[in-house]
Amino acid sequence: MQGKTPIAKRKSIKAKSKPQQVSKMSYSRVNSSTRALIVNDKIFASGTFKDVWKGVYTNGPRKGEPCVAKEFKTGSVFEEHYFQEELSIVERTQRIIDDFAAAKVLENGRIFLNTPEIWTFDETNEKCLTEPMIENFEKFNSNTGWAPVTGTAWVEAMQALSHFSYHDSNRQFLLCDIQGGSYRDG
């Protein structure tokens, strides 16, 4: 891990929700809880810009369900604007997904966006993005043009969503690096 000291010293911490949240839209999966226990003695996953820690909701309708907390790799970020920019991207993505659903591109199934909230660790006041954990995780395409050569109906649906986003946004946006999981109930 280059450039960042592991946060293993914190063992486990609690996060509590802040009132900032992207507006709830029709095809989204949200936290629906107010607290979680995040175990960060080992990085669960790592992307280009964020490290991901696994946890479990401890209060609210999702109590007992797995969640994740995502921290920017550049170190602790306390400033709200970093997170607000991320949430504005989520909101724009949600509008594209809602338009995709309204266009009835898919005959069967629905696409939902995992919608994070800005949460603050109790002990350190560091901010993170917290969201429900995605089960059956898979990568559908990348931001460099990669997509599976062959795939399931869901792989094809994600490529259709990516293509749709370009036209739906009047050539302003292209959803890529699409990742997720398949659920029987949507």
Image (cartoon, grey):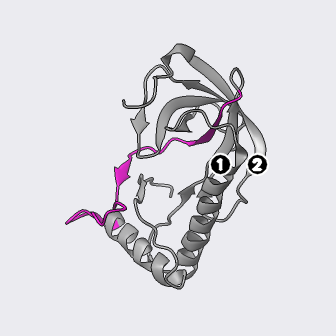
Horizontal side of residue 36 vs 184, given as left or right: right
Residue at image mark 2:
20
Question: Which residue is rendered at x = 45% and y = 53% of the image?
Answer: 183
64 in magenta: no
Q: Secondary structure at mark 2?
A: strand
Q: Looking at numbered disc 2 in the image, what kind of residue is underneath it?
A: Gln
User: Relative to 115, does residue 168 appear above or below in the rendering?
Assistant: below
Residue at image mark 1:
83
Could you tell which of marks 1 and 2 lies nearer the N-terminus?
Answer: 2
Q: Looking at numbered disc 1 in the image, what kind of residue is underneath it?
A: Phe
Q: Secondary structure at mark 1?
A: helix
Q: Give the magenta range.
A: 125-153
Image coordinates of residue 81 in percent, x first then y, are 69, 50
Horizontal side of residue 58 vs 69, given as left or right: right
Image coordinates of residue 152 in percent, x first then y, are 28, 63
Question: Which residue is rendered at x = 45% and y = 29% of the image?
Answer: 4
Q: Is residue 31 visible?
A: no
The mark tally for this picture is 2
Question: Which residue is rendered at x = 48% and y = 76% of the image?
Answer: 165
Of residues 10 and 31, the one nearer the viewer is: 10
Residue that lies at the very extreme toward the front in this rendered image: 3
Q: Specify few, some or many for label 1: CA neighbours under 10 Å numbering under 14, 14-19, or 20 or more.
A: some
Question: Which residue is rendered at x = 60% and y = 54% of the image?
Answer: 86
Q: Specify few, some or many for label 2: CA neighbours under 10 Å numbering under 14, 14-19, or 20 or more.
A: few
Q: Are marks 1 and 2 in contact (CB under 8 Å)?
A: yes
Image coordinates of residue 88 in percent, x first then y, are 65, 61
Q: Is residue 165 visible?
A: yes
Dominant secondary structure of the magenta stretch? loop
144 in magenta: yes
Quadrant position of the N terminus in the picture: top left
Real-space Cα distance between discs 1 and 2? 10 Å
Image coordinates of residue 171 in percent, x first then y, are 49, 83
